[in-house]
Image: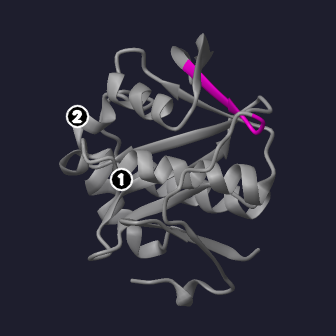
Amino acid sequence: MPLVQIDTARLTLRPFLPDDAEPYYQAVFSDPDVMRYLPGGKPLPMERVLMMHERVRAHWASHGFGLWAVTLREDHTLIGHCGIQRLPDVPDVELAYAIAKPYWGRGLVTEAARASLRFGFERIGLERIMALAVPENTASRRVMEKVGMTYTGMAAYYGTELACYVLSRSEYQAAAAPYTLTVLLEENKLKP
């Protein structure tokens, strides 16, 4: 399966590399403030992050899409993840994201989410993409609204009630923003 990378104005969304485990853990999964809005609600041990890292790679291999490592274009710092993934045990595809706290409030998640939706609708041909948020996570819910998603109510996923947002292909409108998709044939072609 070819690897896919997307460059936006400020970000590179690229496949995860084996060396990403530690910076990914530090950016997202060790921070209580970031984790309070993610499944489990508290920091995860590194072993769980390594397992998640392998699940992300397996998802890409099985479906041709998944989560990307989100890095800053200016210095290649890994700041989190964004992408689309199949939800377990249901046919729905979820837009999912999380970034390190120092990068909150800069519009970076919105930028990554728009690129992920564009990839899902234009490249993969999905008919519908949903997103989920802890109801109190107003920042995440604002991102969903900014990218054109519509609140459809509460739904049970990941063992809890979450706010559900949906965007269909017929409602989707590509943002007039920089977006360059590169198909990579080998991992060694990835930027550091």
* Depth order, front residue of 99/127: 127
For this orientation, the residue located farthest to the left is 102
Residue topped by disc 1:
46
Which amino acid lies under the numbered mark 2 shown in the image of this protein? Answer: Asp
Residue topped by disc 2:
33
Please tell me which residue is depicted at 74% across the width and 32% down the height of the picture: 92
Pinpoint residue 50: horizontal percent, then vertical percent.
46, 57
Left or right: 35 in relation to 86: left
Q: In this view, does 159 lie above or below 124?
A: above
Please tell me which residue is depicted at 59% across the width and 22% down the height of the picture: 150
Left or right: 161 in relation to 128: left
Pinpoint residue 35: horizontal percent, then vertical percent.
32, 35
Q: Distance between the residues labelled 2 and 1?
A: 17 Å
Q: Over which residues does the magenta segment extend? A: 164-170
Helix, strand or loop under label 1 = helix
Which amino acid lies under the numbered mark 1 shown in the image of this protein? Answer: Met
Please tell me which residue is depicted at 29% across the width and 69% down the height of the picture: 77
Helix, strand or loop under label 2 = helix
Number of other residues with Cα within 10 Å of mark 2, as a class: few under 14, some 14 to 19, many 20 or more: some
* Residue 45 part of the magenta-drawn span: no
Quarter of the picture holding the N terminus: bottom right
| Marker count (numbered) | 2
Are circles 2 and 1 on residues that touch, CB within 8 Å? no
Pinpoint residue 123: horizontal percent, then vertical percent.
75, 60
Q: Is the magenta stretch mostly helix, strand or loop?
A: strand
Pinpoint residue 59: horizontal percent, then vertical percent.
69, 55
Q: In which quarter of the image is residue 119?
A: bottom right
Q: How is the image coloured?
A: one colour
Q: Which of marks 2 and 1 is nearer the N terminus?
A: 2
Name the mark nearer the viewer: 2 or 1.
2
* Residue 167 part of the magenta-drawn span: yes
